[in-house]
């Protein structure tokens, strides 16, 4: 089974991710991972923090001469801001000591207050440094590797933004294909529909003028996903449940939809399911729509996988107005500001790709196994030949 673990804080020395369960022989380079991580910093509405949070990564173990060894893969992502100046050295020093400026004006919409209550902290920084979305850089590094594994069985995963604030791509609009990912990434808001993207940019500009923030929705698409990932036999083996859990774990994501899940809830059953047909030319079963998002009974069907994630507006504002309480004095206050963006929806799409890819890769490993990539591919091909 493929699994991973991240460690590190937003303003600390760096992040670390360890990925276990990769088969031997998978081609991996620093450049491949860095290219994927660079996509995480894309998007109109991002703040100056992206210039500070450059991703300098090192492959520590599990790779030799550009190929995985079958042992745990360890990746270190240095925080360039830490090494460029000593601004955070005292504040985030792991050695015994005390902070000179504890944060006690907790931010609504963040983990600050609840985390302080849960762990018995008196300084919000003990919570926010780990709760920060900076942690997703480590996930994207792991996801880059998962994507390479999926590509060995011809699976591609991509995302695009379908809603920004109140602006949404029209129903029935064209979806991007794998060979159109560059076009998505080149768009300022990672929206495939050019007319809608202009409206999204206008929405972001208006929001920025007010010092406010915007949320939105991204759609993740999985192409050529094998039949039978997941299972109907146990609740925790259902692919829908695993996808929902992994995508919902992304910071600020508050809703996950598989296919047209929320829309079909308002339909009659006669118009809420994907008809099945037999394609004699390809000798395969086909669904003629994507209402179920490429899953049935907790398993992938082999059709286009569709997962949508709804991100709330960022709670840290450029013009702080959210009322809060100072936990030290219990007096009313206004939420403090760390570096923030007007919106991070385009970047969240890349993170959502990561979480979907990690979930699919883990289930592909469970289904097909194999200690080497060659064995993994042979097993997948042998299964496909039985369908």
Image (spheres, rainbow, N blue to C red):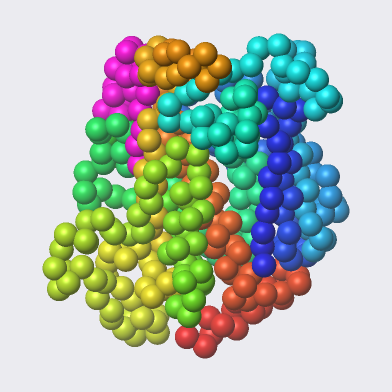
Look at the image and say whether residue 199 sits in the magenta stretch: yes
Q: Give the main secondary structure, helix, strand or loop, of the magenta stretch.
A: helix
Q: Is residue 166 visible?
A: yes
Q: Which of these two is toward me, 153 or 275?
A: 275
Q: In the rendering, at what x and y percent does residue 216 appear?
A: 35, 37
Image position, residue 212 (x, y; %): 36, 19
Q: Residue at x 67, y 38 (%)?
A: 34
Using residue 209 as the reference point, say whether residue 386 is left or right of it.
Answer: right
Considering depth in this image, is 62 or 32 the residue closer to the camera? Answer: 62
Residue 55 picture quarter: top right
Identified at 48% across, 55% down, the residue is 245
Decide: is 127 above or below 361. Answer: above
Relative to 39, say whether 326 is above or below. above
Tell me, yes or no, whether the highlighted magenta stretch contains residue 253: no
Region of the chain picked out in magenta, as a range: 198-217
Instruction: State the image quarter where residue 102 is shown.
Output: top right
């Amino acid at each position: 089974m493929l699994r991973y673990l991240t460690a590190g804080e937003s303003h600390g020395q760096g992040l670390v991710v360890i990925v276990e369960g990769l088969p031997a022989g998978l081609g991996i380079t620093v450049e491949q991972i860095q290219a994927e991580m660079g996509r995480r910093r894309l998007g109109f509405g991002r703040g100056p923090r992206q210039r500070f949070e450059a991703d300098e990564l090192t492959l520590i173990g599990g790779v030799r001469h550009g190929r995985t060894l079958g042992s745990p893969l360890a990746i270190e992502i240095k925080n360039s801001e830490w090494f460029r100046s000593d601004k955070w050295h005292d504040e985030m020093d792991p050695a015994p000591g005390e902070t000179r400026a504890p944060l006690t004006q907790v931010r609504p919409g963040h983990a600050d207050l609840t985390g302080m209550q849960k762990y018995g902290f008196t300084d919000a920084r003990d919570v926010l440094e780990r709760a920060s979305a900076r942690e997703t850089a480590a996930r994207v590094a792991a996801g880059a590797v998962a994507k390479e594994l999926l590509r060995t069985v011809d699976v591609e995963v991509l995302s695009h933004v379908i809603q920004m604030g109140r602006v949404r791509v029209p129903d029935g609009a064209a979806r991007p294909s794998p060979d159109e990912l560059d076009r998505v990434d080149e768009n300022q808001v990672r929206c495939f529909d050019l007319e809608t993207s202009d409206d999204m940019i206008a929405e972001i500009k208006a929001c920025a003028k007010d010092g406010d923030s915007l949320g939105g929705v991204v759609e993740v698409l999985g192409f050529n996903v094998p039949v039978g990932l997941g299972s109907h036999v146990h609740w925790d083996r259902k692919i829908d449940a695993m996808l929902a859990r992994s995508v919902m774990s992304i910071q600020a994501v508050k809703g996950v939809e598989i296919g047209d899940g929320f829309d079909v809830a308002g339909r009659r059953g006669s118009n809420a399911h994907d008809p099945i047909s037999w394609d004699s030319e390809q000798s395969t079963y086909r669904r003629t729509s994507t209402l179920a998002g490429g899953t049935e009974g907790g398993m992938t069907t082999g059709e286009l996988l569709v997962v949508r994630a709804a991100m709330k507006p960022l709670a840290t504002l450029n013009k702080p107005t959210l009322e809060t309480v100072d936990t030290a004095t219990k007096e009313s206050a206004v939420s403090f500001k760390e570096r923030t963006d007007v919106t991070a929806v385009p970047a969240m799409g890349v993170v959502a790709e990561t979480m979907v890819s990690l979930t699919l890769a883990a289930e592909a490993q469970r289904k097909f196994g194999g200690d080497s990539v060659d064995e993994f591919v042979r097993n997948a091909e042998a299964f496909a030949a039985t369908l």
